[in-house]
Image: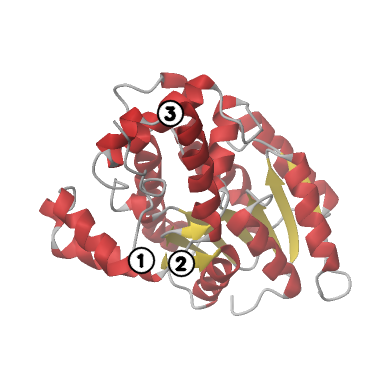
Amino acid sequence: MKDFNSRIAVVTGGGYGMGRELVRQLLAEGCHVATCDVSQSALEESKRLCDTDSRPQGTRLTIHTADVSDEAQVTRFRDEVAKQHSTDKIHLLFNNAGIGGGGSFVTDDRKGWEKTFNVCWGGVYNCSRAFMPMLVHADAGHLVNTSSVNGFWASVGPGIPHSAYSAAKFAVKGFTEALVTDLRLTAPHVKCSVVMPGHIGTGIAANSRKLHTGNTTDVLTPTEIARARARMAGINPAAANLSDADTQRLAVERERSFEADAPMTAAAAATVILDGVKADRWRILVGRDADTLDAMVRQNPEGAYEPEFFQTLATEVGWRLGGPPTPPAVKK
């Protein structure tokens, strides 16, 4: 599939970040797009931006509210796509939706852990199940699943548990790799790719907190402040003595910095992904940090979870994905 003109694409998580940029770039290339997100307001903002972009006349965009972790909602989303696009086939499925959270299997509550896993892995599974027949019905199809560098390195650095997200992203990577052979045998006109981004400038840090807690403001609750302080203390033990006000300030700054100061924008990442699909690559690393980390893990898998490994990574690519800016010294 060397170009996307007149094709039909489905993109999950199209309300923010890479999903939004995938939608915009696909439309610009003449592709019809259906996208979903849990946030109707975010979808409407994506549509507003797309309506101001230049794109070929007649190119259609439909927006749909759906939680990809809920199979019934995914089924409804699929049926809406078929009806609104008057089709029984699609050519591209981008399973992009994801959230962070549920760091520790031992100390974090089960509800938060499973929510993260069910969105990041369950969303890929549910949407792949729902839309695979429509991909098979097309003359050519491509399934694109977003994993992460945490799909081959289950960490964001020493001192911070990261088990739910990492487990889900390993599952996405393994599932997609298994499909390479599966599709060759059962539907050779359908291809697949696994996408493994490094640190991309998106709102996932802030959005994940808000989705888990239901607190849509930037003012953290006492429980959120306690969790943020514990996370910071995993990076710098002095943070355990931070005041609530300093913890609030640093937590919000981390969320802002994660998006604004990232080494690669969401738009640049979307371009890399689409170029990888056109090149029929089943494995798409996104960002210099992803390339570097991939090489480091392969070179030293036994040492990948030692503090020295992360220190080398931080020196190589300036990576601070696991936490906020280093907390200031605490006055005694």
Q: Residue at x 28, y 60 (%)?
A: 314
The mark lying in front, picked from 2 and 3, is: 3
Dot 1: element: helix
Q: Which residue is mark 1?
A: 289
Which numbered disc covers residue 6? none
Specify few, some or many for label 3: CA neighbours under 10 Å numbering under 14, 14-19, or 20 or more: few
Figure quadrant of the C terminus:
top left
Q: Is residue 171 above or below residue 260?
A: above
Which numbered disc covers residue 263? 2
Type of amino acid at the residue the image marks with label 1: Asp
Q: CA distance from mark 2 to mark 3?
A: 30 Å
Q: Can you see residue 270?
A: yes
Q: Which residue is mark 3?
A: 243
Type of amino acid at the residue the image marks with label 3: Ser
Q: Residue at x 59, y 33 (%)?
A: 210
Type of amino acid at the residue the image marks with label 2: Pro
Specify few, some or many for label 1: CA neighbours under 10 Å numbering under 14, 14-19, or 20 or more: many
Dot 3: element: loop
Residue 135: percent from left, percent from top: 62, 57
**Upstream in the sequence, badge 2 or badge 3?**
3
